[in-house]
Image (tube, rainbow, N blue to C red):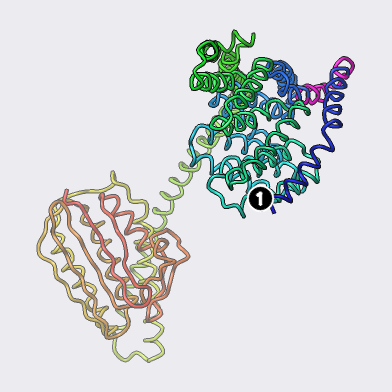
Amino acid sequence: MIKRIYVIVLYSIALNIYISVQAQTAEITGIRADLQTVKDSLHLTDLLNRLGFLMYEKNIDSTFFYTRKARAIAARHDYQKGEADALTNIGVVYDVKGYSALAIYYYNKAFKLYKAIRDTSNQVQVLMNIGSLYHYMGKERRTRKYFNAAFHTGAHLQKDSIMSLLICNYLLAYSASLSGDSIAYYSRKAQEIALRYKDQRSLLVIHQIMASRLIEEGRRQEGLQLLAQTIDSAQQRQLYFASLDMIITMGDYLTGTDIAQAVRYYQMGLDIVQKSGYTFYKEVLAEKLYNCYLSSKKPEEYRYFAEQYIRALKDEKNMNAASSVDYVDYAIKEEQLEAVSARDTYQRWLIAGMLLLSIAGLVFTIIIKKNLERTRKLNRLVTAQNDTLQETLKVLEQSNAENAKMMKVIVHDLRGPISGINAIAGLLLTEPQRTAEDAEMFELVKDSSQNLLDLTDDILALNTKPGALKKEPVDIGDLLHHCVALYMSKAREKGLEIHLQAAPVMIKADRQKLWRVASNLISNAIKFSPAGAVIHIDLEDSAGSVLIGVKDEGIGVPDDIKNRIFDLHTSAKRHGTAGEPSFGMGLSITRQIVEAHGGSIWVESDGQKGSCFFVKLPKE
């Protein structure tokens, strides 16, 4: 199987050597001519990147020269593809020069741009380059990580030409740990792709891998012959950089058996390095030649190559001077430029933000000023309207006070005749020999006049103010006992019981007003309790205040009217259990009196049956 692959590859390479060299030379000449006439900046960037790529096999400094120009143009025009290609070429330059860390840095930058523009093929290439560098640096975990990422990324490529080169680099890195069948399988797969796309570089690498495999399997002569032919093919194609690894491999195979041939190949590699500027390989080759002459005991020759080796080490330390290009300085300046650019971007955003804030502040100030003027106008208007309303309110209050005064005078004047009518009706009812019809009529007159008396009392008690109170020491317990005694006959008429628990407690209050509070609450409890019910009246003494509770077993107070039953002329009026009328003023008057004393009144009820009214009064 290996022999068949070798024959196919060798035939393919031999057939295309002359055509490939001529085509590459013609392409370089054509690009140089186009550079003089091209006007489109993006096309110019692509030409410079392509020329830089083609030149790295001839002179690596030329690659760096053209690539820097391409990158500068791409950056000016925000051409991401052109900048990514330039970054890849710069990574190759640092790779060849032996600056592995810088090479990885630029490869990573290129990868990010390729990923942003979804250039999958070039993503694979950059990941492969990074993986190969980590293999050279001896970092196997990272090597596998990047090779795996490259294979995963390229798995679905429609144009998979890059995959042949990826497989070749993978085989170069791991051929020692792969079986012969695995190497044959991967080589065949890489060869199929390379032949399909006429990728001569990959075919040469496959040839190198197969030669090494033949030697390791004991077919040394066949392997050395295949490797020699591969080196010749690479030289004829002017693929000098690609041939260096093959030349060093050949020298290493020959060192133990044919030192002269080994020296010839090492010298061939050293000649390429000195012409093309591949400084890293100069150190490697000079050291190998030095060791060859040292083992052959030729002092003149190994002294010369000792000097070459030392010079190579110096060249590595002074690489910028040797190539007339300060590669490290370029990378440092780029970092500085990126830092300056980031700072400039931040400052631009800061200035823009401050400008926007200034504009927003100006607009906000104008809006505030206009709103302030509008508010002042509205304030003046509201003030004028308020003054008018105050005057109107004063007039209304004065009118209301006069009306209330007049009403109280009228009510007070009416109270005397109504009381007389009530008294006469009561006397007439006590006379014997009255017909049932007359008795019923006099009873109606008595009840109606009593209702009118209650109404006049309510009207006269309206609008109780703190200043109108005539406070004096009052035994609230004794007051409750007298009030209950007064209403006991009325309670018995409905079949009710009143239970009072009240010890003597002295408070400072208006006796007449407080009597009104107690009578209103007891009267309401009788009015809304059904026959056979019990009314509980309790007095609790505490520090600084007293609490009166009047609890009935009546119809209860629904939640929706709890807050309205204390309002004057409320719509929450209800008739008693025996049809007693309600004027809707009793509880309102009660609250006025309680609040005038600095107390509070409230009701608790489940809304279905029974309610309890509480009055809390201060002692002073």
* Above/below status of 53 relative to 444: above
Q: Is residue 34 above or below residue 140?
A: above
Q: Identify the residue at image location x=34%, y=76%.
A: 528
What residue is shown at x 56% (from left), y 31% (from top)? 252
Q: Is residue 429 above or below residue 421?
A: below
Residue reaching furthest right? 37
- Indicate the position of residue 281 as horizontal and vertical percent values: 59, 22
Is 601 inside the magenta-drawn segment? no
190 or 361: nearer the eye?
Answer: 190
**Which amino acid, by three-letter code, is at mark 1?**
Tyr
Residue 42 highlighted magenta (yes or no): yes
Q: Is residue 72 above or below residue 589?
A: above
What is the magenta segment's predominant secondary structure?
helix
Residue 506 shown left or right of residue 528 in the figure: left
Secondary element at tag 1: helix
> Whole-percent x and y of residue 200?
77, 37
Can residue 6 be seen by looking at this rendering?
Answer: yes
Quarter of the picture containing the N terminus is bottom right
Residue interval drawn in magenta:
34-50
Front residue of 131 and 362:
131
Left/right of residue 467 with respect to residue 142 in the rendered view:
left
Q: Can residue 366 be seen at all in this image of the molecule?
A: no
